[in-house]
Image (tube, grey):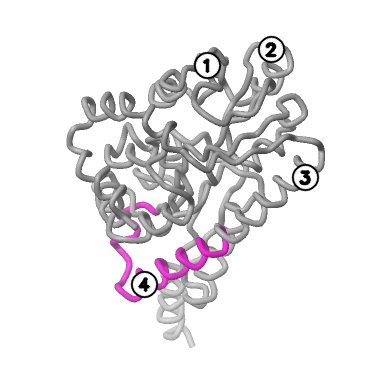
């Protein structure tokens, strides 16, 4: 009987080594649309590889903040993650274009751009830095809200102190519209709006609602000036080490998870808008954005001084129907 022990042990070791549990990073709470999309990605992998590949996402940022997580995925300490492309700029130059104000006409335009050849071009640039982009998630569109009055045209921002993310591009955006940009940590915004340290801020519907900013800034003007996609990314060495069959399984699972995430995001955004309007928020849509876009010309000019190689990519995005 002893002669069977070694082969059986070898078989057990082979089965164990063939299975892999990937670790995923996510900044959001478990019931957020991004989180549910990532969980779906893991479920599909487990199902379609019959348990050879499982993927567990660690939500709520428990594996660290986003800059650290980006580096960890590049190095292989974390296997996959969903990252907003905004902070990706210092690592992958091409990703800076999606942070340009009004670069996308609307969410559907962003989807067409990122799901097509331009998204593949950006993905190829990311792979050179150790990241493979499997699918593009939504993070909504950002608009202005404030404590004073509706914003219908750029001059309505004149003199307003507006909180922005700590990025020179966004500072330049507000200043080009006549406002006073105030970079500030997101957690400080509610109290700053309440006490008048700032007059307004900008964000998407779920963020405006879930943080209760609508309680202290009752005017929401849909400028949709920033539409920054998020990326379901995987470590490049890990992905390139898979068989062609498994690579296709992983990509398809990622794309299906993105379809779910986008649907959930749209539903969540609609729910948030309905809630704040019921609470008395005064909402207006900016249907003609031409004046706002015209005001961005110096912002684009400065951007191209810093990133001259991206001019063609910008033109390609604008030309996408």
In the image, the segment drawn in magenta is 234-261
Q: Front-most of 117 and 66?
A: 117
**Residue 101, x across and y down, in percent:** 41, 35
- Cα–Cα gap, marks 1 and 3: 29 Å
Q: Nearer the viewer, mark 4 or mark 2?
A: 2
Left or right? Give the position of 153 relative to 241: right
Question: Which residue occupies 75% across, 40% down?
Answer: 276
Name the residue carrying label 3.
275
User: Dots 2 and 1: beta carbons under 8 Å?
Assistant: no
Q: Main secondary structure of the magenta part?
A: helix
Rendered view: 4 above or below 244: below
- Cα–Cα gap, marks 2 and 1: 16 Å
Name the residue carrying label 4.
248
Question: Which residue occupies 51% across, 18% down?
Answer: 183
Question: Which residue occupies 63% across, 17% down?
Answer: 199
Was residue 241 drawn as part of the magenta stretch in this picture? yes
Q: Does label 3 or label 4 sit earlier along the sequence? A: 4
Binning the other alpha carbons within 10 Å of mark 3 as few (below 14), some (14 to 19) or many (20 upward) gives some
Q: Does label 1 or label 4 sit earlier along the sequence? A: 1
Residue furthest to the right in view is: 279
Looking at the rendered structure, which numbered label has been put on residue 158? 1
Q: Secondary structure at mark 3?
A: helix
Looking at the rendered structure, which numbered label has been put on residue 196? 2
User: Dots 1 and 3: beta carbons under 8 Å?
Assistant: no
Binning the other alpha carbons within 10 Å of mark 4 as few (below 14), some (14 to 19) or many (20 upward) gives few
- Cα–Cα gap, marks 4 and 2: 53 Å
**Residue 143, x across and y down, in percent:** 56, 36
Q: Does label 3 or label 2 sit earlier along the sequence? A: 2
Q: Secondary structure at mark 2?
A: loop
């Amino acid at each position: 009987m002893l002669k069977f022990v070694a082969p059986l042990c070898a078989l057990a070791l082979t089965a164990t080594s063939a299975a892999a549990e990937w670790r995923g990073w996510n900044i959001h709470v478990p019931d957020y649309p991004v989180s549910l999309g990532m969980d779906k990605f893991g479920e599909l992998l487990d199902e379609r590889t019959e348990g050879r590949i499982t993927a567990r996402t660690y939500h709520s940022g428990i594996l660290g903040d986003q800059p650290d997580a980006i580096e960890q995925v590049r190095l292989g300490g974390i296997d996959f993650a969903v990252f907003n492309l905004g902070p990706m700029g210092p690592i992958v130059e091409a990703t800076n274009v999606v942070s340009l104000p009004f670069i996308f006409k609307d969410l559907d335009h962003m989807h067409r751009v990122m799901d097509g050849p331009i998204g593949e071009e950006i993905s190829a640039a990311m792979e050179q830095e150790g990241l493979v982009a499997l699918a593009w998630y939504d993070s909504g569109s950002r608009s202005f809200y404030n404590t004073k009055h509706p914003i219908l045209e750029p001059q309505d921002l004149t003199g307003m102190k507006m909180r922005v993310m700590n990025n020179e591009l966004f500072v330049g955006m507000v200043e080009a519209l006549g406002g006073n940009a105030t970079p500030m940590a997101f957690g400080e915004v509610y109290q700053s709006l309440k006490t008048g340290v700032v007059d307004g801020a900008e964000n998407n519907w779920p963020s405006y609602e879930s943080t209760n900013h609508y309680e202290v800034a009752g005017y929401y003007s849909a400028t949709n000036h920033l539409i920054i996609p998020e990326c379901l990314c995987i470590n490049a060495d890990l992905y390139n080490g898979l068989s062609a069959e498994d690579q296709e399984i992983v990509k398809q699972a990622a794309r299906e998870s993105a379809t779910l995430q986008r649907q959930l995001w749209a539903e969540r955004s609609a729910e948030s808008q309905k809630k704040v309007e019921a609470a008395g928020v005064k909402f207006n849509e900016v249907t003609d954005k031409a004046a706002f876009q015209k005001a961005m010309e110096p912002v684009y000019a400065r951007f191209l001084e810093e990133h001259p190689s991206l001019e063609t990519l910008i033109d390609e995005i604008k030309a996408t129907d």
